[in-house]
């Protein structure tokens, strides 16, 4: 299948993720007081060697002298290296097993650790060229075979010359000595492998840079274990997405670009054509104009809660799945609410302000424990229900009201109407969603219904409360204290001033929409959204998508997955299945879900299929997009 091509692999930082000698030193120097300093010294020498600064022979000699190891350390090393094989090499093990006679390892490393690591990949000793250690009678490493061709200057070049291999020679490695085989005219192509380390001096010399072994296989039209090299999947992250999101997407092998600010419509429309995955927060508007240019876009990740900034319907119509993080900051909002309830019940903020002005006013009047008090939660969704659990744990009696039927958690009591709730409770806290139908949900009438001396919290959305009415009832003394985190008019940036009728009231806690703003929440959001997008790309899983039918899919094993996204109209499934039946393709599993706009059909089929099936499926009228995974 690979005709007369011969593949020569480097071992350290290519076949495996790390430099094995450094790892051996780390093992041997386990309790040494200067362990890290010695390893760092080794790293420097390694880098000088692989980047061509000093000769390889010199580098090897210097490194070996830095530590004392023995056979026991080598056993530990081999165990560790088994878990450190490069991810894309592991993924494509089948390629190695299918091409054993064409694959060679040529390394400045040592047989003692290379042989056991590459053996499961079908590479036998006669295809491994490497150094060997010398041991004393107590199994201590005392040096290495200096006569080995690979221990000498330009060893790889000399070795390859002596091998007289017959065929087109492709070298894959991360180091300068790998490139030297190409420089010497002994190899047809040199591929700089950058999955584990990027060495600029080597990259410059390469015929092709291959960030993963998938890319190498794809570039050379060789069979691979995944449908498409991940490094060709371009991700654009805007608005300073948390570094955890960047890390996860990079680790997955995607080509990630990130920008601190948002882009305006024209800038984004210009930039979007090559982007497969777009990450943003609340400021970037994804409009029809942008989407019209988004030829490759598979998914959008909103690294926040709201998705009003994205034209969700248009995305669905174009087969672009949108994800957000609906409950990654739930806990942060809940903790703030609990803290504020306690602060308000004790009048802490007013007392603190007095103290700053030199006033000492010790009194228990109007100071209460929260234990035994009735908490009324309006909106028993993610936040409301989590607050219910925590408040109850602190001894509050929880009542809630929601417009849809909700399971009450713990001993929380359901109220049939808002009115019933308001008349009963000591603390009212709003956690309804931000849909516009909730504008002024809370006004004159609702405040009037509340008990005298109540506490009021709004950490949901500003437009839900008529703030003039709130002010009135605070001034009347009916509301003993309030905490407000969200406002009808919120400054767009920290540079704009904040204005509200609630300013200057000592018993009102004002916070700048920070209910969900914690380090933990930002981290959780990045983690959640990045993983959603990775799952969608890898398996088609749409669980929690805000505009796609939600399907949680089993992991794909030994099958191809056809993902067919189409306009929601009758008969699509029948048409897909009749195409497969005509070609006698066996369906291993099939999943279908629709929403108002689109249908999402996943069909797992037995391994073999021909291009004709794909073409036919694409031709079904109403098809929006077809993806194939394997
Ligand atoms: P969610 O969607 O999980 O829950 C909202 C609940 O409110 C749902 O159960 C819904 O049925 C109910 N609801 C809607 N309208 C209602 C009404 N008129 N009366 C009674 N119940 C009603 O939302 P989640 O995640 O719990 O968020 C709640 C609110 O908190 C949202 O408005 C969100 O924007 C806001 N939020 C504020 C943050 C902040 O930094 N202050 C951070 C995160 C969310």
Image: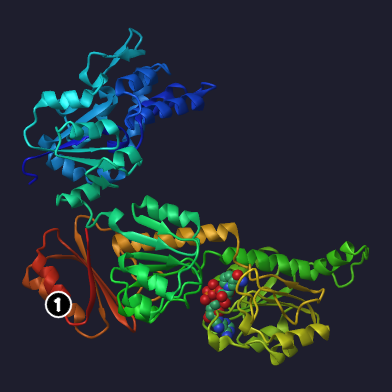
Q: Nearer the viewer, residue 377 or 282?
A: 282
In the picture, residue 121 is in which quadrant? top left
Q: Residue furthest top?
A: 137
- Image position of 352 (left or right of 294): right
Q: Residue furthest bottom?
A: 445
Q: How many marks?
A: 1
Q: Element type at marker 1?
A: helix
x 19%, y 48%: residue: 217
x 6%, y 40%: residue: 4
Asked if one can make out residue 408 in the rendered structure from this viewpoint, the answer is: no
Q: If the image is split into quadrants, where does the C terminus sit?
A: bottom left
Q: Is mark 1 within 8 Å of ligand 1?
A: no
- Image position of 2 (left or right of 404): left
- Image position of 608 (left or right of 24): left
Q: State the image coordinates of residue 582 (x, y, percent, origin top left).
A: 6, 73
Q: State the image coordinates of residue 590 (x, y, percent, origin top left).
A: 23, 69
- Looking at the rendering, the quadrant in which ligand 1 lies is bottom right
Q: Nearer the viewer, residue 576 or 45?
A: 45
Q: Is residue 618 above or below residue 119?
A: below
Q: Is residue 585 above or below residue 380?
A: above
Q: Is residue 118 above or below residue 303?
A: above
Q: Nearer the viewer, residue 13 or 52?
A: 52
Number of other residues with Cα within 10 Å of mark 1, as a class: few under 14, some 14 to 19, many 20 or more: few
Q: Which residue is under mark 1?
A: 619
x 37%, y 76%: residue: 290
């Amino acid at each position: 299948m690979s005709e007369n091509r011969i593949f020569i692999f480097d071992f350290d930082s290519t076949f495996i993720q790390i430099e094995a000698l450094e790892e051996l030193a780390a093992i041997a120097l386990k309790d040494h007081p200067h362990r890290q300093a010695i390893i760092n010294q080794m790293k420097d020498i390694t880098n000088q060697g692989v980047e061509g600064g000093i000769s390889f022979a010199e580098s090897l000699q210097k490194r070996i002298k830095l530590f004392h190891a023995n056979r026991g350390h080598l056993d530990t090393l081999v165990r560790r290296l088994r878990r450190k094989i490069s991810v894309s090499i592991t993924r494509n093990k089948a390629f190695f097993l299918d091409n054993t006679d064409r694959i060679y390892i040529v390394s400045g490393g040592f047989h003692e650790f290379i042989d056991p690591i590459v053996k499961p990949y079908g590479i036998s000793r006669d295809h491994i060229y490497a150094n060997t250690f010398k041991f004393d009678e107590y199994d201590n490493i005392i040096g290495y075979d200096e006569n080995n061709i690979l221990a000498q200057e330009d060893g790889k070049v000399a070795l390859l010359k002596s091998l007289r291999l017959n065929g087109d020679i492709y070298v894959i490695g991360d180091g300068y000595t790998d490139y030297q085989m190409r420089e010497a005219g002994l190899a047809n192509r040199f591929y700089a492998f950058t999955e584990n380390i990027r060495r600029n001096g080597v990259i410059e010399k390469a015929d092709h840079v291959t960030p993963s072994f998938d890319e190498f296989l794809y570039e050379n039209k060789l069979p691979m274990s995944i449908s498409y090299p991940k490094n060709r999947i371009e991700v654009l992250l805007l608005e300073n997405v948390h570094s955890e999101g960047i890390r996860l997407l990079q680790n997955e092998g995607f080509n990630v670009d990130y920008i601190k600010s948002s882009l305006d419509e024209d800038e984004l429309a210009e930039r979007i054509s090559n982007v497969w995955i777009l990450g943003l927060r609340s400021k970037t508007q994804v409009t029809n104009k942008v989407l019209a240019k988004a030829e490759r876009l598979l998914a959008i990740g909103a690294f926040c809660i709201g998705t009003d900034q994205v034209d969700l319907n248009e995305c669905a119509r174009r087969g672009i799945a949108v994800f957000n993080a609906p409950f990654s900051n739930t806990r942060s909002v809940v903790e703030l609410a609990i803290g504020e309830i306690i602060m308000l019940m004790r009048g802490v903020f007013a007392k603190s302000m007095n103290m700053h002005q030199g006033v000492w006013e010790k009194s228990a009047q109007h100071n209460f424990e929260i234990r035994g008090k009735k908490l009324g939660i309006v909106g028993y969704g993610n936040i409301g229900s989590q607050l219910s659990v925590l408040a109850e744990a602190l001894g509050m009696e929880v009542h809630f009201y929601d417009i849809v039927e909700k399971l009450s958690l713990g001993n929380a009591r359901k109220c049939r109407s808002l009115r019933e709730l308001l008349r009963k409770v000591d603390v009212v806290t709003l956690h309804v969603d931000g849909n516009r139908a909730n504008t002024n949900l809370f006004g004159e009438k609702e405040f009037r219904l509340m008990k005298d001396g109540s506490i009021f919290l709004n950490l949901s959305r500003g437009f839900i409360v008529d703030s003039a009415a709130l002010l009135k009832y605070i001034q009347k003394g009916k509301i003993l204290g309030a905490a407000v985190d969200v406002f009808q008019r919120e400054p767009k940036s920290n540079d704009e001033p904040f204005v509200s009728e609630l300013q200057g009231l000592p018993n009102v806690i004002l916070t700048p929409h920070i209910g969900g703003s914690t380090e933990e929440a930002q981290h959780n959001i990045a983690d959640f959204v990045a993983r959603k997008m990775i799952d969608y790309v890898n398996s088609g899983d749409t669980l929690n998508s805000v505009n796609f039918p939600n399907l949680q899919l089993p992991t794909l094993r030994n099958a191809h997955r056809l993902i067919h996204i189409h306009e929601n109209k009758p008969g699509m499934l029948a048409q897909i299945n009749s195409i497969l039946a005509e070609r006698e393709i066996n369906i291993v599993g099939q999943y279908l879900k629709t929403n108002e706009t689109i249908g999402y059909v996943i069909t797992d089929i037995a391994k073999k299929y021909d291009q004709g099936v794909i073409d036919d499926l694409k031709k079904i009228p109403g098809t929006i997009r077809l993806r194939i995974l394997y």
